[in-house]
Image (tube, helix red, strand yellow):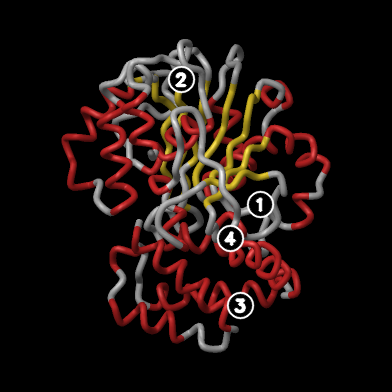
Amino acid sequence: MNIIDYIKLHKDEDFKTFPFTDVDNLIFACIPYIDFTGIVPAFKKNKITLYNAVLEINKNKTKYQGLFVGNTFKMLNIMKDTKRYGDALLYNYMKVVNEEMQFGAITIKLNDKSIYIAYAGTDTSIIGWEEDFKMAYLYPGVSQKYAGIYFNKALGLFTKNIRVGGHSKGGNLAICAALSAKSFYKRKIIAIYNNDGPGFLKAQINSKNYIKIKNKIKMFVPEQSIIGMILYHSKDYEVVKAKSFSILQHDAFNWRCNSKEFIKSKLNKRSKNLEYKLTEKLEQLSNEEKLKLVNDLFKIFRNNNIKDTKDIKIGSIFKLIKSFKKLDKETKRLLIEFILIIFIK
């Protein structure tokens, strides 16, 4: 079964009857991929139930197309009619896409009074993908800084039992938020969820601040993980059985679970090689070389005034792939797969 099957199975059980699981984490991590602008209040002390928020997004169904976003829309429509999720309170929604960053987050209060702060992964904006690539040499990036600001602003004095998480880049931002959390809130964090999100530079992973929170980090990756194998991360992660292959396993709806937890598996050989070889390769490049690589990759988009992947023409794709010719075979293949996931979203 996948997360939609899990939702249907536990639809009549609230979080007191059947406590929060790692699978619930992945479900909530997908929510900020949906645009709730004008529906979920942004730092106005108002809240809206998940049920009512979904009724509002249903008024503009054509907005939520694409494989992953379409499945998230479908998932929310199933969630709204359940005892487990329908009365969850949504608030503090933020979506920012400008010339510097692509950032999204939402605060969710469950019916057991616990909190889940979910950070959005990369959407279809070009700046979002450029931010991801910049992680190879820059910390903190603009979204990573904003993640901490959001976290400290989203919580009230008496907030407790806090979970923070995200899928893809959102998983990285969840860790950044915990790193920047005020000590008062940091003590109240139950778990930090990174669902196949990229890691960090070596200096950050070895920092005292990271070491203090690493026991609360729960990282999950599919068998053929690519995104989750980028940069340095905790070695204590769980591999989840997944449907499909390669970059398509990054899609949360392809992850397999049973009635209580993810189905465990093993990382495949290629992902293991990526975990070490790609990170080592990036480590060997200077910051100037990394900067040039990222600038060269995204120059094609800037020169054609392309700000969203939806606007990309076939000719631009060929130009982009042609620009990879100087790279080694494995790096070239990886970058082509990144392009694939951009179009899947």
Residue 140: mark: 1
In front: mark 2 or mark 3? 2
Instruction: Mark yes or no: residue 146 visible.
Output: no
* Res 287 quadrant in image: bottom right
Mark found first going from the N terminus, 3 or 1: 1
Mark found first going from the N terminus, 2 or 3: 2
Q: Are marks 1 and 2 in contact (CB under 8 Å)?
A: no
In the rendered structure, the answer to whether residue 245 lies left or right of residue 78 reads right
**Nearer-the-camera pick, 261 or 166:** 261
Circle 2 residue: 109
Q: Are marks 2 and 3 in contact (CB under 8 Å)?
A: no
Q: SS at mark 2?
A: strand
Mark-to-mark CA distance, 4 and 2: 37 Å
Q: Identify the residue at image location x=66%, y=69%.
A: 278
Mark-to-mark CA distance, 2 and 3: 43 Å
- 341 up-or-down from 89: above or below: below
Q: Position of residue 259 (x, y in %)?
A: 44, 28
Q: Identify the residue at image location x=76%, y=41%.
A: 210
In front: mark 4 or mark 2? 4
Mark-to-mark CA distance, 1 and 2: 28 Å
Circle 4 residue: 268
Circle 3 residue: 292
Q: Amino acid at mark 1?
A: Pro
Quadrant of the image containing the C terminus: bottom left
Residue 264: mark: none
- 294 up-or-down from 42: above or below: below
